Image (cartoon, helix red, strand yellow):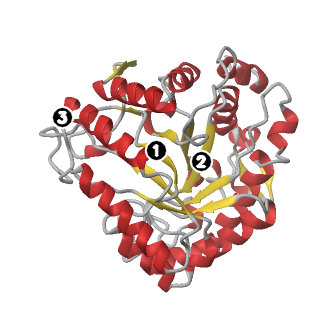
Amino acid sequence: RVLPLVSLLLVVALGAPAVASAKLPAGFLGVQADGPLFSGQVDVGKELTTMQQSGVRSIRLAVYWDVAQPYATIADVPPAQAGDFSDEGGTPTRWGVLDLFIAGAAQRGLRLLPVIQRAPQWARKHPSVGNSPPSASGRQAYARFLTALIGRYGPTGAFWTAHPEIPRMPIRQWQVWNEPDGVRDWSDQPGIPAYVKLLKPAYAAVKAADPGAQVVLAGLVGRSWEDLQQVYDKGGGRFFDVAAIHPFSLEVSNVLKILRLARATMKRNGDAGKRLVVSELSWPSAKHKTKQQYGFEVSEQGQAAKIRQAVPQIAARRKPWKISAVFWSTWLSYDRDTTYSFDYAGLRRLRNGKVTPKPAFYAFRSVALRLER
């Protein structure tokens, strides 16, 4: 039986304590919310409470454009699904899952950094390719989707007006895509030139809808400092407020080196005053468990040890490097895929319908609560 939306919102939202003040900047320590967390097998409200009680202060939320806007026009929506969609600037849009999650996060005082990614088939350059970049018209459609998101969850958002029982925590940062310099999320490589073409209208849309909002650059991966330089070379420096790096490496010292190089690139290009966010930090506990290895897989105990080493060291450099947040990727994983290491990246695992903590969870909780004291 399907409950009315307001009832579902209350089920997710109630019963969580407010977030206490901390010495770290507000929202500094966060986790990624994606994958099995939205599988329908998980008590999301319970997981959000566990996050809050474990020192999580912000969430990088994967917002899949293809899920929210799978159809280009109202006429394309199957009659049986018509009730799931609202008309947002001419594009049918479903908000249900996002509404539930954002309500639960707000009740617990958890800040959100949505990362908007994955084009629907009708907006792809290559319609049959799931990781295709947007087409030329798709880039404009992506900008319109950002406008719709801000219209719903921004400072004057319709969601907050419709649900006065939910504490207002408007979203003021929006991350434009994920890893356009990696083939997993952007099929056509090198991806930076086309990505900057997406970034420009996205930036304009965000600033038009909420001039005080910040545009966060897509998290860059691999030789990310060089890809960041490409963003500047293509004129993209004017179209983001916060840079983002995914500094994956086996050694913590190399993670710090990557961040240092990214900061140097920003300074060299006149952006010394801009903030930097580590929008994914991870060591998957996939050592000897997957056929394909990136080179930074570790054991479960090794994953916990990396958290104890890396998070305090990044936090210690947050002021000189202007790091505004660090997000562990990810909160919850399946830990079962034999081909993809990041399926073992979670602090917690979902197995046989049950969520259990990994050693990394206890390490993160210990480090987070200690740093916040």
- Residue 16 image position (x, y, % from top left): 64, 18
Residue toward you, 283 or 151: 283
> Which disc is residue 113 wearing?
2
Residue toward you, 61 or 136: 61
**Of the residues shown, which amino acid type is indicated by label 3?**
Ser
Q: Which residue is mark 3?
A: 299
Q: Is residue 350 left or right of residue 359?
A: right
**Of the residues shown, which amino acid type is indicated by label 2?**
Leu
Q: Are marks 2 and 1 in contact (CB under 8 Å)?
A: yes
- Residue 105 image position (x, y, % from top left): 64, 31
Q: Earlier in the sequence, mark 3 or mark 2?
A: 2
Q: Are marks 3 and 2 in contact (CB under 8 Å)?
A: no
Q: Residue sitting at 36 percent across and 34 percent down? A: 346
Q: CA distance from mark 1 to mark 3?
A: 20 Å
Q: Is residue 111 visible?
A: yes
Q: Which residue is mark 1?
A: 327
Q: CA distance from mark 2 to mark 1?
A: 10 Å
Q: Residue sitting at 63 percent across and 48 percent down? A: 68
Q: Secondary structure at mark 2?
A: strand
